[in-house]
Image (tube, rainbow, N blue to C red):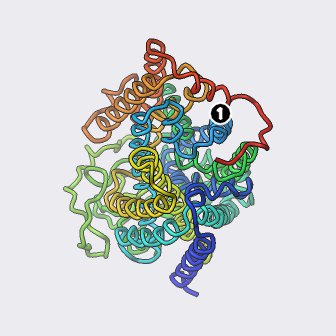
Amino acid sequence: MSLNVLTYLFIGLSFALYLGIAIWNRASSTQEYYIAGSRVHPTANGMATAAVWVSVAAFTSLTGIVSFTGYDASVYLMGWTGGYVMLAMLLAPYLRKFGKFTVPDFIGDRYDSNIARTIALIGVVFISFIYIAGQMRGVGIVFSHFLHVSIDWGVVIGMFIMFFYAVLGGMKGVTYTQIAQYCILIFAYTVPAIFLVIQVTDHVLPQTGFGATVLASVHPGWAGSSVLDTLDNIVLDLGFHEYTTGTRSTLDTFFITATLMAGTAGLPHVIVRFFTVPSVRDARASAAWALIFIAILYLTVPAVSAMSQLNLINTINGQHGEGIAYSDMPEWFKSWELSGLIVWNDRNGDSKVQYAAGDAFLGGKPELNDRYGEQGQRLAENPMIDTDTSPGFDSDLQPYANEIFIDQDIMVLANSEIVNLPEWVIALVAAGALAAALSTAVGLLLVISASISHDLLKKTLLPEMNERQELVIARMASIAAIVISGYLGLNPPDSVVATVAVVFGLAAATFFPMIVMGIFFKRMNKEGAIAGVLIGAISTLAYIIYFKYLGGTRDDLFLGISPEGFGALGMVMNFVIAFIVSSVTPEPPEDIQLLVDNIRIPIDLGDSEAP
């Protein structure tokens, strides 16, 4: 069978499976719609949590950013993994024992304040929609390439699919769908990884192949050198920074890692998964299982990233390192070029494709249209770029200027084609990428619908609403959220990883301090919590907007801390302001303080009731 037929088959069968599971496990009550009736087995919930956690940012974009930036991208691996450990050990069991399955509900009851509940609700909805924008763009990229449609149409197709199994199934149907999605996405990531490692090093496991030597069949000049040593030498010759050393300052690296860790622990769509199991003990077991399932992918990412970069350079620049004629470029290159995610700019007019450091187009990204050049390449509207003054080019360090724009988000998807893996493996990767994107997007949609129907309406505006009305409104809120998320996917604010980084910064500066102090500091009151979260949110958002969208330069950075890392500083300000304000205002009511004491008292965890 052809690649197109296999791709349609794999994607079609996987979607049929998702829809079948959602319909079979359709939610019939608000308990089932929000938290699957709290009857999911810990191992199964761990797998579903891993599917929500991985997302398209980890499945596709993380590999791309590690592949292109090397050591600097280690902050994502350390921050996201460490954050999950912190969530599992520090927060999840206590939140599960408290019994409130949404972050706004916990904050509203813990601080005895509808104002705090509303602020948390606004934060949850805002953060969730930003996160969804990255997931929807990932869906669009996959569909655009493998189904040969535009990225916009790919997003629209993803919207229709999410409508059926999120709106109908609720958390009950989505949980079992996410279990299936985890199995598909982890198989789709690890199988090509094993193929890749065998081809490059003759090892089987990516974790051992990462430190092995490169085979002569890959490139005679690289034979006998380790993967990382080879990559260091190659990228230096092309004008890049050494792959195994970083360009960030130690302080910036620390703050980015801390932001990602604290942001992870405050993500509402991950927290809610710990309420789908029967007890606190099961929540702890579920967290442990999820960490194991997540580690399978995260321990594979570095090897796949490094070897992907080796193969990319070898394929584009050729055995002699002088570039390959455009007419001789393989089919995968021209296929991705049609999607606009790889674009060639023949700057020196030699008809060769050459990859090196620096921007290939003025302004960084190509501005595409429907025009094509004499050789069939896509043309961009960007003004001509001057080689001698182009950003990132140094004639003393590299043999030629860069002529290629490559979207980092395509590396996992394109990698199987670059190394000529079997077509069924390429089709499997497409199904896995869609599983990663949809599992997270649907989890976020359910968080948004619960925030609107349960926290805003049931708990605040319409407390007399019955369960049937709440369920109907929850489904209507899901439909509205799908439409808005589709719009954000069609008009994404940034790349997938950059968009997700903003989310983690805001979560770190807002939810994490409110939750931590709500659990471990019974003197914390609503005045302190509200003051702290406002300071954290405003400072972090202002810093991000200034440097991301208003022209801020590296010279303007506070202590050299990048926008991705400022969330940790916003978190510190939140903690300090909240502590000071709560110390000079009245204590919380006695029943609230007793409630805080109760959730921290060790009890027979197996007897904890479901909320």
Residue 225 visible? The answer is no
Give x and y (percent) for residue 178. Answer: 61, 62
Give x and y (percent) for residue 88. Answer: 66, 40
**Quadrant of image for the N terminus:** bottom right
Q: Quadrant of residue 145?
A: bottom left
Give x and y (percent) for residue 302. Answer: 61, 49
Q: Nearer the viewer, residue 51 or 310?
A: 51
Q: Nearer the viewer, residue 196 or 159?
A: 159
Q: Quadrant of residue 376?
A: bottom left
Q: Is residue 396 left or right of residue 65?
A: left
Image point 25% across, 38% down: which residue? Answer: 550
Count the marks: how many? Answer: 1
Q: Quadrant of residue 37?
A: bottom right
Q: Nearer the viewer, residue 42 or 587?
A: 587
Image point 51% across, 82% down: which residue? Answer: 4
For disc 1, the marked residue is 90
Vertical arrangement, residue 272 with respect to residue 468, above or below: above
Find the residue positioned furthest to the left: 383
Q: Is residue 119 left or right of residue 315?
A: left
Image point 62% across, 44% down: which residue? Answer: 229
- Which amino acid, mark 1? Leu
Judged from the image, the secondary structure of the residue bearing numbered disc 1 is helix
Give x and y (percent) for residue 293. Answer: 69, 53
